[in-house]
């Protein structure tokens, strides 16, 4: 009997209905015996799959791109599962890889959970040099949609992104290389970085100029890119944009002062006047002294506009600053210096990011409908992980940093297990669109976050 698991959530479906539909799909899949191999791919043409995207399709994990993670990238998992034996080439980089956030070195490793402390391992090196054709996985970590029509090397990218030199290698743009490969199926996931970078820079316009990309610009470039890709193949699967304000990268660090020794929330004693509810005046005792009460309260960090509010978000990049006492009041041993804007998101910036994502996804849905293309609802998946969680192979995946198992140490990219869940969502999507009968992959065989050791 083939093994089945619950499919990922669908876009714009209420949670209760989504759960019911998921159960029905699970039963149907098990009854129909979805499997792999010839005769079950329906209309799918898997002869030459090409992936175009950013770090999410590249398989970036723990803040770096490296071979063992690349082997569990979404396109690699999908091809290995749906077309075993296919010659699918990726620009592999030796472990511990090359950092994806302009940092020196390779992937992140966890030094301590309490208090939180991360470190970077040494830098790896490219392993797949000399391939005389385009790679099949053309996804470039940190790629912006706004670069998609022109960039094929670091010099042509907006921020000198070195991954263009390693992956596109000056051989042409995404569409040009897909045409050279004569792609029969294209996975397209671009646009996340155009709002994610804004969020990871704390909404600081100076640190993220021009971001998030205006919706009109996004739409024009997206449609132009699709025009170019549809000249290569009609089989294109789109991925929509997850909400970056739900990611662990902006929830792992609380907006409160923590005890540097234990990692627990630091509590301070607050003295408050006791008010008489009938008179509205402060109570006095039998000796005529004003009455006060004491309570323990958490102490907020200090941000660019003063004490952080309860809805303000702090990014993971604030971690080393807080360790130096920045953002921590002098009265409890800090410097009293406020955290910079680039590591703090206020309510207005959070709203701007979410509105942009909603507009991007509305455009992707409209374009997909007009062109009869399938859309993988990553936005709905991440939303489900952030609310109820998503169960896969008996494991609950959430957006909790370290323990949620879906997202890696950088708080942005997925773990291999998380990429497996997205791959299963891709399988659900192509099964519905192309009449294929591919079963889910076993996410139990994929690792989550490595909590200890290197």
Image: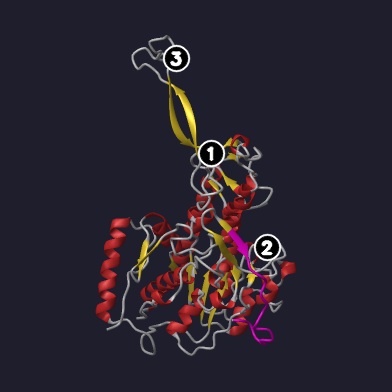
Q: Secondary structure at mark 1?
A: loop
Q: Residue at x 64, y 40 (%)?
A: 338
- Where is residue 162 shown, x and y percent of the image? 70, 69
- Where is residue 23 shown, x and y percent of the image? 27, 67
Residue 306 is drawn in which quadrant? top right
Question: In this figure, which residue is indicated by the disc labeled 3?
Answer: 290
Q: Is residue 17 left or right of residue 131?
A: left
- Where is residue 4 shown, x and y percent of the image? 31, 76
Q: Residue at x 61, y 50 (%)?
A: 318
The magenta region covers 118-135
Residue 95 is drawn in which quadrant? bottom right
Q: Is residue 278 magenta?
A: no
Q: Secondary structure at mark 3?
A: loop
Badge 1 vs badge 2, beta-carbon distance below 8 Å:
no
Going from N to C along the chain, the mark reached first, 3 or 1, is 3
Q: Which mark is residue 102?
A: 2
Q: Which mark is residue 218?
A: none
Going from N to C along the chain, the mark reached first, 1 or 2, is 2
Residue 454 is drawn in which quadrant? bottom right
Q: Can residue 410 be seen in this snapshot? A: no
Going from N to C along the chain, the mark reached first, 3 or 2, is 2
Question: In this figure, which residue is indicated by the disc labeled 1?
Answer: 300
Prevailing secondary structure class for the magenta stretch in the rendered image: loop
């Amino acid at each position: 009997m083939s093994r089945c698991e619950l499919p990922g959530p669908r876009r714009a479906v209420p949670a209760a209905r989504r759960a019911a539909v998921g159960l029905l799909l699970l039963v149907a899949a098990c009854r129909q015996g979805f499997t792999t191999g010839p005769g079950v791919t329906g209309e799918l043409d898997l002869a030459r799959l090409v992936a175009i995207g950013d770090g999410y399709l590249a398989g970036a994990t723990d803040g770096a791109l490296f071979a063992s993670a690349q082997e569990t990238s979404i396109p690699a998992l999908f091809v290995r599962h749906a077309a075993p034996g296919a010659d699918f080439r990726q620009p592999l980089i030796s472990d511990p890889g090359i950092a994806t956030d302009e940092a020196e070195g390779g992937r992140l490793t966890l030094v301590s959970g309490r208090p939180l402390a991360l470190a970077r391992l040494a830098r790896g090196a490219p392993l797949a040099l000399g391939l005389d054709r385009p790679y099949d996985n053309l996804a470039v970590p940190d790629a912006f949609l706004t670069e998609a029509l022109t960039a094929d090397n670091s010099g042509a990218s907006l921020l000198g992104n070195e991954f263009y030199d390693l992956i596109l290698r000056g051989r042409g743009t995404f569409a040009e290389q897909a045409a050279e490969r004569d792609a029969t199926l294209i996975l397209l996931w671009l646009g996340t970085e155009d709002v994610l970078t804004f969020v990871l820079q704390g909404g600081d316009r100076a640190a993220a100029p021009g971001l998030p990309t205006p919706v009109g610009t996004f739409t024009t470039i997206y449609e132009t890119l699709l025009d170019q890709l549809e000249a290569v193949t009609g089989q294109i699967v789109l991925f929509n944009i997850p909400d970056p304000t739900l990611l662990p990268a902006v929830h792992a660090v609380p907006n409160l002062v923590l005890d540097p020794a234990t990692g627990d929330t630091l509590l301070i004693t607050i003295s408050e006047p006791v008010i008489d509810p009938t008179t509205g005046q402060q109570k006095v005792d039998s000796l005529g002294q004003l009455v006060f009460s004491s309570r323990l309260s958490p102490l907020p960090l200090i941000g660019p506009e003063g004490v952080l509010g309860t809805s303000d978000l702090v990014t993971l990049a604030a971690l080393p600053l807080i360790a130096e006492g920045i953002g921590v009041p002098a009265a409890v041993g800090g410097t009293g210096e406020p955290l910079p804007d680039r590591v703090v998101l206020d309510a207005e910036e959070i709203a701007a990011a979410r509105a942009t994502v909603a507009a991007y996804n509305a455009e992707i849905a409209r374009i997909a409908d007009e062109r009869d293309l399938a859309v993988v609802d990553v936005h709905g998946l991440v939303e489900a992980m952030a609310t109820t969680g998503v169960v896969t192979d008996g494991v609950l995946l959430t957006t909790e940093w370290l323990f949620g198992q879906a997202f890696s140490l950088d708080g942005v990219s997925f773990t291999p297990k998380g990429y497996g869940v997205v791959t299963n969502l891709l399988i659900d999507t192509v099964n519905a669109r192309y009449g294929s009968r591919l079963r889910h992959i076993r996410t139990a065989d994929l690792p989550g976050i490595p909590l200890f050791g290197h």
